């Protein structure tokens, strides 16, 4: 069977330069824009690589002119022609191909285009669901194309780094046993074993640990992870992470590997020089100074304890302290970008309240004195406050008091973030940092028991091992997060490799020995066979690509994401299935009343 002949490209639409003058070329691509000036036609032909201007001269033969006149936006065409330099006044310095144009000799329509739901622009301003319904068109836009290409380059550089450092790339299964890892599992019914289910992995965590028991030593995988969570914030039901595990390592070995990896990838892909080592902050210091365990260190605005609260006459402050809480402040510098009006202070207060603050106290520096807000409670301390806080003319001191230290920190941290953005304090560039010394457990108020802050396989720091059960809240773990520009980019830990210690952690997290055996028996079993000390980490690829692409949702760096309602407008999934498919799986659908 012979293939359909068409004019096949000899150059792409981003390639031609002045030195190509005189070459006869064939371009294939899409009609990005076309302008007709009578018999003179300009066609901007686009493909993944760029745009080249094609011209049909006014003295071209009438058939060619007719072909050009019949073109419509986004037709897929082939053009044969001769490269010529543009006259100096027509050179387009914004386009890499802007020195030249192709004088068309033949135009062939490869396929026509239906009425477009939106114009193909560098950045598409259509509603997101419309963009996602026609994602294949949305991806034609320069911005989306560039982001997908950048993502490819990052993943490629990551793989190259690991290949040259002796890591093995190993695939782990995506049909696994349902094992609690923090979020809800996606379940996959088994047809062959009716009534039984696989789960999709929330991460390859247990498999990578088992690979260490196998002696694989250094493992990585670009892994897809699935978490059946409610649509909230910038979550996707499936996301991609760079999953890493290493044997015979201590915490600093993992941190240094990641520093080296990011140094290498940022240099090669973005030509950015990163510091050889990233700043390290303990969880407590990060919370105290920046009000977050993922602080944006592109700006300062550090928070401090408001020491004047101890002996003041303002009840909100003294009570918070009496109940074991904290009173913290930061100084918002005078700014031409934002006046500190009542309305603005209320907006900041609202930001604080999201994290549990009861209110936001404030004082302004005006004519060398403190004024407004809670000043009257501190009249006798004015000069001490000015000296200790360093607040200057026009600055504002913002204070949060809370009986719960964490809520106090997080609330003022939210104010800090808001000020960073509104006062234009956030610089360019990449501020990486490590957060270390996290608590190992968190108390689940709703269920009334402790649970793992990261996951149950993380090692407690040595000094706490003897008395884990006594005060789980005080135990620090060998956990670490990598933070970039205010986003949590990676989490990891040194793992437990001792069965008895692992069982104690399960018990503290409310898993009886029987439940632990039932869910994690295979891991405990494996730990009977000389597991090596090991640890790992898993940076999120979507987030990394989002940050370096300077966009604010991971949907902009995923070719086919779900929308904010956790469904796909393009192929309309999730969708119902045929009754016979359910029958084969021995499943009956029992809809909740409101969904019927
Ligand atoms: N499995 C962990 C996660 O997905 C990462 C790790 O501890 O390596 O967050």
Image (cartoon, rainbow, N blue to C red):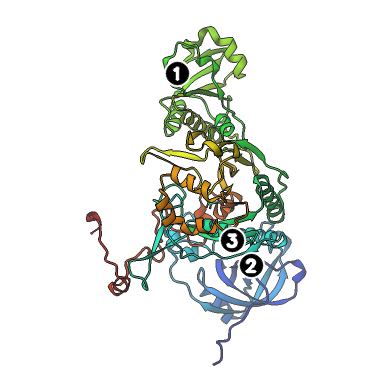
Where is residue 486 shown, x and y percent of the image? 56, 41
Residue 375 visible, this angle: yes
To which quarter of the image does residue 304 belong?
Answer: top right
> In percent of the image, x 41 and y 59: which residue is there?
186
Where is residue 267 shown, x and y percent of the image? 72, 52
Looking at marks 1 and 3 on the same chain, the residue that comes earlier in the sequence is marked by: 3
Which residue appears farthest toward the top when viewing the image?
380
Q: Which residue is mark 3?
A: 211
Residue 122 visible, this angle: no
| Vertical position of residue 254 compared to residue 223: above or below | above
Q: Nearer the viewer, residue 50 or 592?
A: 592
Between marks 2 and 3, how big is the CA–CA gap? 54 Å
Q: Secondary structure at mark 3?
A: helix
Q: Quadrant of the C terminus?
A: bottom left
Q: Residue 322: give its label.
A: 1
Between marks 1 and 3, how big is the CA–CA gap? 51 Å
């Amino acid at each position: 069977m012979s293939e359909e002949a068409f004019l096949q490209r000899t150059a792409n639409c981003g390639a031609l330069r002045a030195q190509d003058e005189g070459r006869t070329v064939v371009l294939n691509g899409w009609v990005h824009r076309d302008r007709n000036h009578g018999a003179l036609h300009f066609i901007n032909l686009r493909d993944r690589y760029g745009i080249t201007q094609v011209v049909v001269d006014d003295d071209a033969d009438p058939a060619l002119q007719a072909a050009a006149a019949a073109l419509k936006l986004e037709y897929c065409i082939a053009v044969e022609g001769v490269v010529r330099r543009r006259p100096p006044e027509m050179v387009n310095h914004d386009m890499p191909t802007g020195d030249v144009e192709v004088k068309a000799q033949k135009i062939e329509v490869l396929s026509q285009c239906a009425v477009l739901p939106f114009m193909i622009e560098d950045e598409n301003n259509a509603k997101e669901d419309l963009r996602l319904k026609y994602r294949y068109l949305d991806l034609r836009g320069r911005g989306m194309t560039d982001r997908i290409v950048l993502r490819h380059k990052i993943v490629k550089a990551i793989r190259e780094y690991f290949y040259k450092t002796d890591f093995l790339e190993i695939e782990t299964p995506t049909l696994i046993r349902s094992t609690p890892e923090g979020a809800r599992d996606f379940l996959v019914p088994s047809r062959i074993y009716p009534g039984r289910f696989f789960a999709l992995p929330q991460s390859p965590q247990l498999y990578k640990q088992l690979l260490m028991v196998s002696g694989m030593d250094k493992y990585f995988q670009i892994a897809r992870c699935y978490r059946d969570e409610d649509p909230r914030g910038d979550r996707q039901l499936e996301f991609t992470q760079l999953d890493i595990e290493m044997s015979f390592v201590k915490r600093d070995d993992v941190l240094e590997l990641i520093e080296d990896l990011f140094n290498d990838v940022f240099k090669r892909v973005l030509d950015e020089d990163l510091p050889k080592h990233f700043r390290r902050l303990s969880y407590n210091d990060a919370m105290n100074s920046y009000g977050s365990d993922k602080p944006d260190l592109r700006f300062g605005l550090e928070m401090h304890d408001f020491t004047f609260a101890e002996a003041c006459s303002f009840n909100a402050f003294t009570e918070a302290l009496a109940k074991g809480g904290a009173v913290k402040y930061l100084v918002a510098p005078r700014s031409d970008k934002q006046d500190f009006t009542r309305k603005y202070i209320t907006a900041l207060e609202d930001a604080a309240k999201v994290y549990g603050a009861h209110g936001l106290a404030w004082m302004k520096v005006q004519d060398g004195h403190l004024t407004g807000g809670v000043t009257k409670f501190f009249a006798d301390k004015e000069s001490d406050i000015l000296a200790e806080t360093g607040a200057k003319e026009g600055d504002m001191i913002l204070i949060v008091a809370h009986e719960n230290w964490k809520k106090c920190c997080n609330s003022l941290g939210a104010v800090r973030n808001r000020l960073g953005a509104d006062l234009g304090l956030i610089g360019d560039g990449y501020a990486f940092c490590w957060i270390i010394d996290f608590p190992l457990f968190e108390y689940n108020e709703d269920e009334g028991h402790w649970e793992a802050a990261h996951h149950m396989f993380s090692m407690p720091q040595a000094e706490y091992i003897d008395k884990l059960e006594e005060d789980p809240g005080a135990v620090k773990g060998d956990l670490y997060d990598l933070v970039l520009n205010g986003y949590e980019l990676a989490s990891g830990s040194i793992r437990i490799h001792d069965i008895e210690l692992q069982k104690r952690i399960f018990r503290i997290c409310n898993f009886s020995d029987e439940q632990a055996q039932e869910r994690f028996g295979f891991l405990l079993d494996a730990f009977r066979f000389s597991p090596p000390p090991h640890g790992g980490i898993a940076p999120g690829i979507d987030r990394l690509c989002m940050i370096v692409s300077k966009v604010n949702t991971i949907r902009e760096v995923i070719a086919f994401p779900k929308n904010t309602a956790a469904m796909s407008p393009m192929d309309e999934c999730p969708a119902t299935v045929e009754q016979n498919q359910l029958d084969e799986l021995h499943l009956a659908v029992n809809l909740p009343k409101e969904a019927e």
